[in-house]
Amino acid sequence: MTKSPFPEGFLWGGAVAANQCEGAYLEDGKGLSPVDVLPSVEGGRWDAVMNPTKALETKYDYYPSHESIDFYHRYKEDIALFAEMGFKSFRLSISWPRIFPNGDDATPNEAGLAFYDRVFDECAKYGIEPVVTINHFDTPVELFKNYGGWKNRKCIDFYMNFCEVIFNRYKGKVKYWMTFNEINMILHLPFFGGGMDVNGEANPEEAKYQAAHHQLVASAMATKLAHEIDPENQVGCMLAAGATYAFSCDPKDVWKAMQADREGYFFIDVQARGYYPSYSKRFFKEHNINLVMEDGDLDVLKNHTVDYVAFSYYSSRLTSADPEVMKETEGNVFATLRNPNLEASEWGWQIDPLGLRITMNAIYDRYQKPLFVVENGLGAVDTVEADGSINDDYRIDYMREHVREMGEAIEDGVDLIGYTPWGCIDLVSAGSGEMKKRYGFIYVDRDNEGKGTLNRSKKKSFDWYKKVIESNGSDLV
Ligand code: P53
């Protein structure tokens, strides 16, 4: 066993999101989340995600989120299992429509607030630090229907009402916040990211960036408010990260890769540095994007930057300037080519642990703020053996190499505060709506059609991760 590169007090943990684990989709006064109107993969998930107006008018046979893994009723058992693994932190999101079912309600839903009190109290029992995503793909569907989602500036006010309520309510219970999950995802999955449908827009790019502006302003305002309500609060931004590599040493490919990375950095440049990056001016001009801003927007962005930079990392990406070569990438959330040096998961996500180190170094060089890896992991099919055991060595291999590279990045000088791998307990996939795409250390007996007992059981990776935490990242075998 070697000396651990991980600092004392490192926030080992795991991550989930309300809309993918809670279920109880209408219980105790909850309103609809975007996922609640989406079908399974067999039901046409992808088409529905990209055409939410149509999805809303369609009656599907099965909605995976409605019951999900029933975290709403089973959180005690689940948090006890996290504690058994030794979690120091637990990343979860607060369902906005559970607190404000219509988004624009005058008063919050007390039953929803009480649920998260119970969850945070349960965490406190075990000394687990909650890390809360304020909006994880969870803009109330009513705000989509009645306001068109985030392209409407009114969403800033609704979001701020939500923030004010939860910052006050959970003061002293929650210290780590993130304003928007994968904020750059609004460009790729506008229904998830911004509660909107851009299909009817004359200039969809403009609509997305206008919505992004509203979120960036809301994020800065929320950061300000969080600090005012409790100076102990730490507020982060959250990027869907993954360094983009150039397909060849042709400078055109290198330039294309740089531009691809800037597409995501754009958001964090604003949230972490406090102003629109210089390259955005040309981008907006060339795409005919004219943002409407109000007096004071640029000041609030400047004065209330984030305390830390959180991100998800599943894979690196590969791009080329040649449209012929790029044809291969159609149908991916992020256009990425197959990298011949990497293996891919069953869902085609390429496995690149060194890419995590590269990504961490790039982000830290750029912002010089503490980093938090709040999502990472392998979505895979697990097999339950006759004796009930689940031998997910492939997951252990994936995690081991990523934890090792995180350690290397720390040795490189990166300031890293924590690691919360995605779907620490199996949950519904955001992209495909499947249960079969599992990330957990904890198995949940439920399938793609919603059959199963919902019983929890430990996978082999459970004991492995427990040892990793116990040894503060020095024992990875
Ligand atoms: P699923 C696509 C690409 C990268 C990250 O994804 C993504 C997505 C959306 O599919 O989302 C994040 O469940 C997101 C989580 C999501 C997780 O990655 O499709 O923050 O909500 O579950 C994994 O395998």
Image (spheres, rainbow, N blue to C red):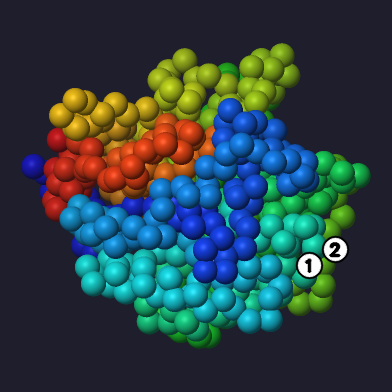
Measured from the top left, where is residue 75 in percent x and y?
34, 60
How far apart are labels 1 and 2 at the CA level? Answer: 10 Å
Measured from the top left, where is residue 410 in percent x and y?
31, 50
Give the residue type at disc 2.
Answer: Val
Image height of 117 relative to 314, above or below: below
Mark 1 or mark 2, which is nearer to you? 1
User: Marks 1 and 2: CB-CB under 8 Å?
Assistant: yes
Label 1 lies in ligand 1 vicinity (Cβ under 8 Å)? no
Q: Would you call the spot at circle 1 few (<14 residues within 10 Å), some (14-19), or many (20 or more)?
A: many
* Residue displayed at 47% across by 15% down: 340
Badge number at residue 471:
none
Measured from the top left, where is residue 332 in percent x and y?
61, 29
Q: Quadrant of residue 198?
A: top right
Measured from the top left, where is residue 4 in percent x and y?
17, 50
**Residue behind mark 1:** 153
Badge number at residue 292:
2
Furthest-right residue in this view: 202
Q: Is residue 415 visible?
A: no
- Give the camera-side residue of 129 and 53: 53
Q: Would you call the spot at circle 2 few (<14 residues within 10 Å), some (14-19), or many (20 or more)?
A: few
Q: Quadrant of residue 221?
A: bottom right
Indicate the secondary structure of the residue bearing disc 2: loop
Image height of 232 relative to 441, above or below: below
Quadrant including the N terminus: top left
Give the residue type at disc 1.
Answer: Arg
Quadrant including the C terminus: top left
User: Position of 473 compared to 411: left or right?
Assistant: left
- Give the camera-side residue of 271 and 366: 271
Image height of 219 relative to 25, above or below: below
Q: Is residue 171 visible?
A: yes
